[in-house]
């Protein structure tokens, strides 16, 4: 038991140190692993560290607790000098699943809380304004028009070869029934992931985050991912059970960690996002579509989203479950990002970006989640004198 505690403390220390590393030039984990395996010392230390993190005490059967702890520390210190220690993955890359497998074997968290896990993906740091320059369909004009922006976005997709091809590729499996099921959900999810990974945001976001004035438009937006197949199911599982299921899959676990990293709310920031970046939040959200944690708009009258789950049968874990669910449903950062995209605006439209100073991102998230129920959520985005009024679709409080 004492050895187990030592291994746990090593893992927590490793996670804390890694989260504080600067970005810099980093190899993806596949290349970093290949480099490491070519070096005898690195290969040995990596294997030792994986055993430490996994808590496989049988590999230290002849060692005392202190000896096991020293061996783990030695392996960690040695790998801190290697590119493997700071590797990341890129969403949609070749061998993405293998890259993520290597990442999680390196940074496996034993705390069982996705809210404390860093994103395994290399930061994109894109801006909505970059997308707008390439996408007339989501500029200011559609917001002021009386038409159906979501329908216009679908038409624009059909005029783009890439968007049309990948959209057709998910529509087919998501609408084709099988002998006993409405559709093949596994194939539907895979095709949806490809759509959002491969299609330029100016087209995919145009259909998913289009600004609406009426129910016909919002319902079309809600139907974008063919929810009868990709989202809904016969029964709603408990959200914590769904979270555990997600963590067993490298892609889902990584996309969920990315979502919590890039859509963290922060009331003191200009945008209500800790990272002051709407584009990264929308990218992280869209990355969840096509996993067991697929989110969608919960109705046609608001911007609230949620995975297909609830908090019934939570027992003593009801508070933890509600925190998890509310991060989706009542996330002001995500709602403002969706509104901003639909309005053709961005964070720096109003004033220069001033990052919020915090000790760690995870600490801020945890503290905000504890107070979710007591805070008043304001989903209005500040407007600029030269900018259109925000939120053509009013967010329901």
Image: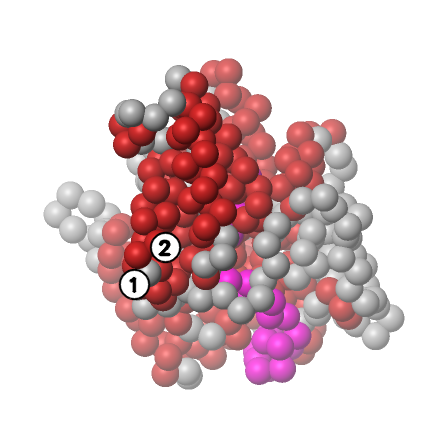
Q: Residue 49 versus residue 355: which sits nearer the camera?
A: 49
Residue at the spot x=83%, y=75% of the render?
386
Magenta highlight range = 116-139
Magenta run includes residue 50: no
Q: Residue 261 versus residue 46: which sits nearer the camera?
A: 46
* Disc 2 secondary structure class: helix
- Above or below residue 161? Residue 226 is above
Q: Going by the image, does 278 lie left or right of 309? A: right
Q: Going by the image, does 266 lie left or right of 162? A: right
Query: Residue 247: percent from the left, percent from the top?
Result: 38, 40
Residue at the spot x=77%, y=50% of the render?
357
Asked whether residue 216 is in view, the answer is no
Residue at the spot x=22%, y=52% of the render?
184
* CB atoms of marks 1 and 2 within 8 Å: yes
- Above or below residue 166? Residue 340 is above
**The quarter of the displayed image where residue 329 is located:** top right
Residue denoted by label 2: 42
The quarter in which the C terminus is drawn is: top right
Query: Residue 161: percent from the left, percent from the top?
Result: 36, 83
The quarter in which the N terminus is drawn is: top left
Q: Residue 314 versus residue 84: which sits nearer the camera?
A: 84
């Amino acid at each position: 038991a004492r050895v187990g505690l030592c291994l746990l403390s090593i893992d927590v220390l490793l996670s804390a140190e890694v989260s504080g590393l600067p970005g810099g030039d980093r190899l993806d984990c596949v290349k970093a692993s290949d480099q490491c395996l070519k070096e005898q010392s690195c290969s040995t230390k990596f294997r030792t560290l994986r055993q430490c993190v996994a808590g496989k005490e049988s590999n230290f059967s002849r060692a005392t607790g202190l000896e096991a702890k020293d061996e783990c520390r030695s392996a960690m210190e040695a790998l801190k000098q290697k590119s493997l220690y700071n590797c990341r993955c890129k969403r949609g890359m070749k061998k993405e699943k293998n890259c993520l497998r290597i990442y999680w074997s390196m940074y496996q968290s034993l705390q069982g809380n996705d809210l404390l896990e860093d994103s395994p993906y290399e930061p994109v740091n894109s801006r909505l304004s970059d997308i707008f320059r390439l996408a007339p369909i989501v500029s200011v004009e559609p917001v002021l028009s009386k038409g159906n922006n979501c329908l216009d976005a679908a038409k624009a997709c059909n005029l783009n070869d890439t968007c049309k091809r990948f959209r057709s590729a998910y529509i087919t499996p998501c609408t084709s029934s099988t002998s006993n099921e409405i559709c093949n959900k596994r194939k539907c999810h895979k095709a949806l992931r490809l759509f959002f990974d491969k299609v330029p945001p100016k087209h995919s976001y145009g259909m998913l985050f289009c600004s609406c004035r009426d129910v016909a438009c919002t319902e079309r937006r809600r139907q974008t991912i063919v929810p009868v197949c990709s989202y809904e199911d016969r029964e709603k599982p408990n959200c914590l059970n769904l979270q555990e299921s997600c963590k067993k899959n490298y892609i889902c676990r990584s996309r969920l960690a990315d979502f919590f990293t890039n859509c963290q709310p922060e009331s003191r920031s200009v945008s209500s996002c800790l990272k002051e970046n709407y584009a990264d939040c929308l990218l992280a959200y869209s990355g969840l579509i096509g996993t067991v944690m697929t989110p969608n708009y919960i109705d046609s009258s608001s911007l609230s989203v949620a995975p297909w789950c609830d908090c019934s049968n939570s027992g003593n874990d009801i508070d933890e479950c509600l925190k998890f669910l509310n991060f989706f449903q009542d996330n002001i950062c995500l709602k403002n990002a969706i509104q901003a995209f639909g309005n053709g605006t961005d964070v720096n439209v109003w004033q220069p970006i001033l990052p919020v100073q915090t000790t760690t991102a995870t600490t801020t998230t945890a503290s905000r989640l504890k107070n979710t129920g007591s805070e008043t959520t304001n989903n209005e985005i500040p407007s600029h004198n030269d900018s259109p009024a925000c939120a053509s679709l009013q967010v329901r409080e």
